[in-house]
Image (cartoon, coloured by chain):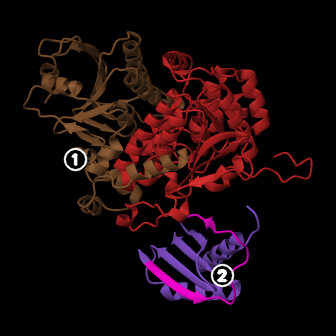
Chain colours: A purple, B red, C brown
Amino acid sequence: METLSYRHTAARRAAGARPMAIVGVVASGNLEVLVERVLPGSDCQVEISTPVIGFAKVWEAVITDFVERRSPGGLRLSINDGGARADTVSLRLAQAVRLIEEDGR
Amino acid sequence: MNPPTDGRRQSPSWYESAARDRARLLLDAGTFAEFLGPEAREMSPHLGIFDLPRQFDDGIVVGHGKLAGTPVFVAAQEGRFMGGAFGEVHGAKLVGLLRAARDVATMPVLILFDTGGVRLQEANVGELAIGEVMRAVIEARRAGAKVIGLVGGRAGCYGGGGLIAGTCSALAVSEHGRIAVSGPEVIETNRGVEEFDSKDRSLVWRTMGGKHRRLLGGAELFVDDTIDAFRAAAIALIERAPAFDLAMLKAEQARLAERLKRFGKCADGLDVWKQAGVDDPAKVPGMPADEFIALARRIGEGRHDAR
Amino acid sequence: MTLAEILASLFPAGHDIVRQGGIMLGSGPLKSGGRVTVVGVADRMPLGVDDALVLAGHVLAAIDEGGKDPILVLIDSDSQRMSKRDELLGLNEFLAHLGKCLMMASLQGHHTIGLLYGHSAAGAFIATAMSTQSLVALPGATPAVMDLPSISKVTKLSIEALQEKARSTPVFAPGLANLAQTGAVLATWDDKRSLADQLQALLDAPATPGDQRDRLGKERKGRPKAADIAARVYDLALR
């Protein structure tokens, strides 16, 4: 297993007040993203656990792109990867942020 | 599926829904609260040995909420993670929930099965968990708690899951649901394709599927593949579930003996259904849910006091 | 030990246990003077719907008699019977029913003891051995959840690779030592000593109420998390 961790500063804090959200499932070609509103300011952290070794550069690019487009400030995103493709990863990250920014339940 | 008649959205498919969504949407809106959820990160301590990815909730969601105003406990297995199979942590979450139900006794437990059985990478501890779950179900029922099983997910309800289902007070199953001990592939590997062709989907469903289980008496209710249908079934089953006592076990002994007498020589599900009183058994597999439910009601409701 | 030797050591004064195909039914005297009901599966028979129902009936009869006679379950079985017919007829219910009857007996004050002397696996293991209050074994017993070749097929790892991994963990590979360490098997009896004595000692020992297997697994360092996770969920649920 490979563990990766990336820290960024987003343009602004993520909207909403929900403390936590989760999307996805750990299955072949899929992943789960747990997102928690626990960081100060516009800090953003993404931690990945993946059984596919050697793709750090790809993860880095996907995460950097995600931070730029979605401004997930204040959020810690934790990923358990089941061997997903980059576009699925991007999708889940976006879904996670959308969910935690949602009003109400 | 019936079109919505009053502008409301159709009830989501049970089969397509994630475990957490099934639990949340089954219960009264806004009442579901999870115990030891993913943020607790209580994962499998064993999958790393096999270089397998873990899931934050180890594939099961446990918590409580209200069902039509009644406080209930709920456990929902995620069939898409490791086939919903029982591992150490997965099983322990369900055991803890059931022990609580035993000591509260007034709160029913809904088990949303979606499991292939024991997680082989954790075979011994998974099997132990299943044994402990069965004991905990019995103790909870003995204390007066109803334990209702709902089966309709991707993984079905196989192996030890099938045995746990057999300890529940009552069961509801949908078209997608299957309940069995040995899986189709295992039977084929052990006994040959003549005994069981695991690739014959129709055979699998005639032998283990929801409609067959309903007609055989292996499940109390057959329901459509929607959250609403399972919710209605859970409410109905809580009402009529039997107590767990010697009289019930004797009634079950009689029920199962009667089943062997009636169907023991049947070669196929079609023969069972014919024996059970279905005029045209070949029509059953393709029958839409509401038609099948009406047929099953005409055939007869099994005993309610013998599970 | 052969089955005959086991029965002779358990019941030196004789017994009335009879074979009915793959199963055994009967009773025998205890050293203390009482009687113990005996049921069992022999000769590595797979457990199917028919035999499961007969065994359950015998257990129910024992409960019906009242009293507090213990029940001894002798186990040398295969897995559940793997056949179209058994699944068609709802094997899960038959095996669960047997398990329920054994657990009910225990709740009614009949100490249920599983004595694993041969093999047992999967669904048969759950319905018999794991449904008893106290599971003990004789040296040489070979319990398994699933055999290594099947685990190999499903996990896509070679048997050698699995055996290598099994050296560092008791959680998946077949065997008595692993099932003891994880908390399933309470104790392994001494096949050089009187089994009647060991049975009596087990019956006389003070019994902690409730299922202790997860706690045992934690103590023996075979199952590090189960007891704590169950306790935490329990506490949260009762709040």
> Can the viewer see residue B116 in this picture?
no
Label count reads 2
Residue C128 on image: x %, y %: 35, 30
Q: Chain of mark 2?
A: A
Quick one: B199 or A14, which is closer to the camera? A14
Q: Amino acid at mark 1?
A: Ala
Quick one: C54 or B77, which is closer to the camera? B77
Asked whether, in this view, residue B135 is left or right of residue B124, the answer is right
Instruction: Please tell me in which quadrant of the rendered image residue C52 appears.
Output: top left
Residue B68 on image: x %, y %: 74, 39
Label 2: which residue? Answer: A72
> For the point 55% across and 59% down, which residue is it?
B37
Quick one: B94 or B290, which is closer to the camera? B94
Asked if residue B13 is positioned above or below residue B99 in the image, the reply reads below
> Can the viewer see residue C165 in this picture?
yes
Q: Chain of mark 1?
A: C
Which element is circle 2 on? loop
Spatial CA distance of label 2 from label 1 is 50 Å
Asked whether, in this view, residue B193 is left or right of residue A74, the answer is left
Q: Amino acid at mark 2?
A: Pro
How crowded is the residue under tag 2: few (<14 C-alpha within 10 Å), some, or many (20+)?
Answer: many
- As for residue A21 lying within the magenta part, the answer is yes
Magenta stretch, residue numbers? A3-26
Asked if residue C101 is positioned above or below residue A41 in the image, the reply reads above
Residue C199 on image: x %, y %: 19, 25
Residue B252 on image: x %, y %: 52, 20
Label 1: which residue? Answer: C177
> For the point 50% across and 77% down, which residue is it?
A48
